[in-house]
Amino acid sequence: MPDPDIVVVGGGMVGLASALALGERGLAVALVDPGEARARTSYGNAGVLSRGSIFPMAGPALWPKLPAYLRNADSALRLNHAHLVRVVPWGLHFLAAARESRWRRAAAALVPLTTAAYPAHERLAERAGTRARLHRSGWLKLYRTETAFAGAALERAILAEHGVALEILDGAALRDREPALVRPYARAMLLTETAALSEPGALIEACERLFSQTGGRYLRGAVTGLAPEAEGWRVAYAGGAVRARQVVVAAGAASAEILRPLGYRFAFAAERGYHRHYALHPDSPPLTRPVLDTGAGSIIAPMGEGRVRVLSGVELNARGAAPDHRQIEAAAREAAGTLRLGGPLDNQPWMGSRPSTPDGMPVIGRAPRHAGLILAFGHGHIGLSTGPITGELVADLATGAEPALPLAPFAPDRLLRWPRL
Ligand SMILES: Cc1cc2nc3c(=O)[nH]c(=O)nc-3n(C[C@H](O)[C@H](O)[C@H](O)COP(=O)(O)OP(=O)(O)OC[C@H]3O[C@@H](n4cnc5c(N)ncnc54)[C@H](O)[C@@H]3O)c2cc1C
């Protein structure tokens, strides 16, 4: 077999979208991935594609919540304290990014990316034949008390500054709009420029099929080494090795480990998350859009056929540590007060790892010290949404085209040095 022009490492939303966009530009592409569908974070997320998802976790709201977070007393975040020493660079960058000025800057940098995300999803869905899975339903942030709603005033002001459309609903209007909700909420914010994707895993499978149908080479196995050579790269993987002039590292939460032998030490972490499916009670109206219960720190998303997916908040822990189901169990208990739920439909909760940068922005750009190495990882909470547009940006970089969006905020080197605290 002739060598491909480019090898993509990782077959989640970001890697697959990159591989497809590169193929569309006429490059011969090989994609290397172990091929376990459920191992991808892109398989198990909430399916929310929102223009308003521009807020990094590190922000001014962190400070009042920090004591509860450190005691594991807030279900939105669970810490393995012993693990914290292993993510010190991430933690220091995270604290630096929590300053309001930095948080605002990150939100402004993310707006072009989240704005381009939906049109890129539509283009991908047309090619992959999954258009029917995209629903322009909007999504709801729910507030249990007026105080909690007032606490999100800055968020709403920033969304308004960036022209993100939203509606504020009081409790009665919310019940009319989403009758499946049985818990009384004080207020809700409906972000209308949002699509919900039912069964994100089905999009990933359709992208895999499209990749093979359009001439892409899918190489199954984990990458074990990247070696620069005179003419490009040798990529060793469990099934052998492949050579190409360029390589894209898009392996989600595993990306930083893959790059470490090349001398890159990224401030990077895994934010683990869980989901479990439940049937809605037969007498319940359907849930028509994803909801984030800010009081529980968890999301419930409709997945079709009367099923809902309950998703946990963030667990800061080693990617490979044994699952800790406490957070998803708490989320499920809260969800049972929000909707009329039947029993769980899965034997075990699913677990995945969000590829987390401390400033909430992805890494998209050329590697600082190696020619022919493109980095596309760290999409945190918005990688399903921004994966397809990232793929198009990767294709711009690989073909020498002017990137469709400004990439300076996403430059890799910002996470390779100590932060300015
Ligand atoms: C609970 C939860 C809810 C979420 N909700 C949303 C949401 O509503 N909207 C949204 O936009 N985002 C959401 N996200 C985030 C989103 O799922 C991720 O940002 C996104 O899936 C990251 O995509 P990725 O391609 O970078 O990583 P992944 O999907 O994890 O893919 C990485 C790939 O790399 C492969 N890989 C790993 N190691 C190697 C190796 N050595 N060699 C080759 N391949 C390797 C893996 O097998 C995998 O296929 C959520 C995440 C979680 C956990």
Image (spheres, rainbow, N blue to C red):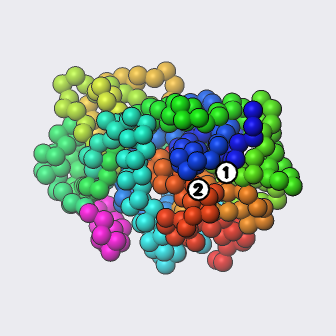
Q: Position of residue 178 (x, y in %)?
A: 19, 43
- The magenta region covers 146-165
On the rendering, which quadrant does ligand 1 occupy? Answer: top right
Numbered label attached to residue 376? none
**CB under 8 Å between discs 2 and 1:** yes
Task: Identify the residue at horizontal 46%, vertical 65% (top origin).
Answer: 110
Beta carbon of the mark 2 residue lies under 8 A of ligand 1: no
Amino acid type at mark 2? Val
The answer to if 290 sits in the magenta stretch is: no
Q: Earlier in the sequence, mark 2 or mark 1?
A: 1
Tell me the element at label 2: helix
Residue 156 visible from this viewpoint? no
Category of crowding for the residue at label 1, using alpha-carbon neighbours closer than 10 angstroms: few (below 14), some (14–19), many (at least 20): many
For disc 2, the neighbor class at 10 Å (few under 14, some 14 to 19, many from 20) is: many
The quadrant of the picture occupied by the C terminus is: bottom right
Vertical arrangement, residue 281 with respect to residue 369, above or below? above
Q: Nearer the viewer, residue 24 or 18?
A: 24
Between 41 and 241, which is closer to the camera in this rendering?
241
Residue 161 highlighted magenta (yes or no): yes
The location of residue 81, given as percent across then percent down, is 66, 51
**Type of residue at label 1?**
Val
Distance of label 2 from label 1 (alpha carbons)? 8 Å
Quadrant of the drawing holding the N terminus: top right
Residue for badge 2: 394
Instruction: Name the one closer to the observer, 207 or 64.
Output: 207
Label 1 sits on residue: 248
Does the magenta stretch mainly form a helix, a strand or a loop? helix
